[in-house]
Image: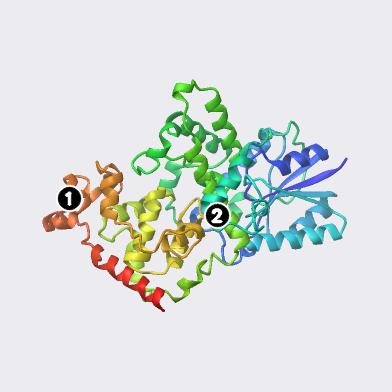
Amino acid sequence: MSTAIVWFRRDLRLADHPALSAAAKGHEHLIPLYIHAPHEDGRWPAGAASRWWLHHSLSRLDAQLREHGNALHLAQGNSLDVLRELIRRTGATAVYWSRQYEPEAIARDSAIKAALREQGIDVHSFNASLWCEPWQIETRQQGPYRVFTPFWRSLRPQLETPRPLPVPSSLRGIDVAGSMPLDALALLPRIRWDTGMQETWQPGEQGAQEWLDIFMDDAVSDYARARDLPARHGTSRLSPHLHFGEISPRQIHRQLADRVADTDARRRPDIEPYLRELGWREFAHHLLYHFPRTPIDNFNEQFDRFPWARKSSKAIERWQRGLTGIPLVDAGMRELWHTGWMHNRVRMIVASFLCKNLRQHWHHGAAWFWDTLVDADLANNTMGWQWVAGSGADAAPYFRVFNPVTQAQKFDPEGHYLRRWLPELASAPLPLLHEPWKDASLLQRSGYPAPMIDLGETRQAALDAYRIMRNA
């Protein structure tokens, strides 16, 4: 009776799992395996918030597998060595996995695939996280896209895919000794700063499905407007579930399409704006695959000459702690620290503040988000920061500097988001809530800091720096 290893990575689900389904179809016994190998991620080992999520997601996956008469085998070390040892001890004849698209992962997987095939092991890899592989979408010149809109026009017609795969009917395993206890991976913080994340999130496949159900019931019909309102749950909040593969974009699309089909035409929600946002996720992976240096290098090489300000650890720390004296920036950074997540519009605003008003290099912001976001994803993080900085593909022009005051007045007009995350200003009158520095006594009573910079002056300094670069 043949045995196969299913190597789980960031595909921590049982439904719509092509590798798992293929292994279950072709073999009598399955060994679900997770290998903790942060050293193989090169410059990008998972940050603290992502490790927290990973711990709980692995726990949920193991519980699901046990319901099906199997269990998750946990190991730590060099991936090829772990696979070879497990093959030796179990007699497994095949290894199945879902593809990853980061440069280090591609190099590792290619080497492992070659090595295992050389010793006679069948190796099968599948797409489990994207609508289309990054190499399947090409321009008419057979090159990669650099602008989102034509990329989306090419991708959108290909979304009519078959129905997602069900959980395999049989996931029968075998007894395999030597699995590590989950706690031995030391993914959780030693000092428990994760209370807010525990209150906010339910990692795992069930948690992903619950968020999707809530989104379909309450938010998708108003998504085009509500997605910009940080005080509302107007977005899907599925980004961490997508990153860890607890749900697939194909599942999301199919369930949204089914909901539309089952709804009276007069009340039928328009799901296109949300699908387009998922398209940006695909575009990010497209860019990372074709331009693998972008997590480090400017996509637009012209920005190699940009006159960034000298690194200021003090300024960066105030930004990180939400103590800039600019309410919307501080609210966003405190939401991030407490929940491991930040509303997307607020992400753009805090990034603009760091890169343009403080003129600190986008690397500093990307590194902080990488460590503190539960949905930290190399493709999305890189594209987002380079987009705001002006150096990326299809980027916002550098001279677009978000004004956090007018943005708060427009998208948090009643101040609910600001009051939630800035308790020292919770009782401030609305006009002062957006601009508390206009009343020195309010700052004194509340303890809220005065602005660390003048928004107008620093905006002009950013524009001057941009002109210097353009003329260099």
Camera-nearest residue between 451 and 348? 348
Identified at 57% across, 36% down, the residue is 253
Identified at 84% across, 53% down, the residue is 121
User: How many marks are shown on the rendered structure?
Assistant: 2
User: CA separation, marks 2 and 1?
Assistant: 38 Å
Report x, y in % for residue 130.
Answer: 62, 47
Report x, y in % for residue 390.
Answer: 43, 63
Camera-nearest residue between 143 and 32? 143
Q: Residue furthest top?
A: 264
Q: Amino acid at mark 1?
A: Leu
Q: Report the quarter where the C terminus lies.
A: bottom left
Camera-nearest residue between 44 and 230? 230
Report x, y in % for residue 139.
Answer: 62, 55
Q: Under tag 1, what secondary structure?
A: helix
Which sits earlier in the primary sequence, circle 2 or circle 1? 2
Report x, y in % for residue 260.
Answer: 52, 27
Q: Under tag 2, what secondary structure?
A: helix
Which residue matches tag 1? 432
Residue 64 lies, with reference to residue 136, above or below; the image says above
Residue 300 lies, with reference to residue 62, above or below; the image says below
Q: Amino acid at mark 2?
A: Ala
Identified at 40% across, 53% down, the residue is 347
Q: Residue furthest bottom?
A: 472
Which residue matches tag 2? 284
Q: Is residue 117 visible?
A: yes
Q: Report the quarter where the N terminus lies.
A: top right
Q: Is residue 245 visible?
A: no
Identified at 43% across, 40% down, the residue is 235
Q: Nearer the viewer, mark 2 or mark 1?
A: 2
Q: Categorize mark 2 by other alpha carbons within 10 Å: few (<14), some (14-19), many (20+).
A: many
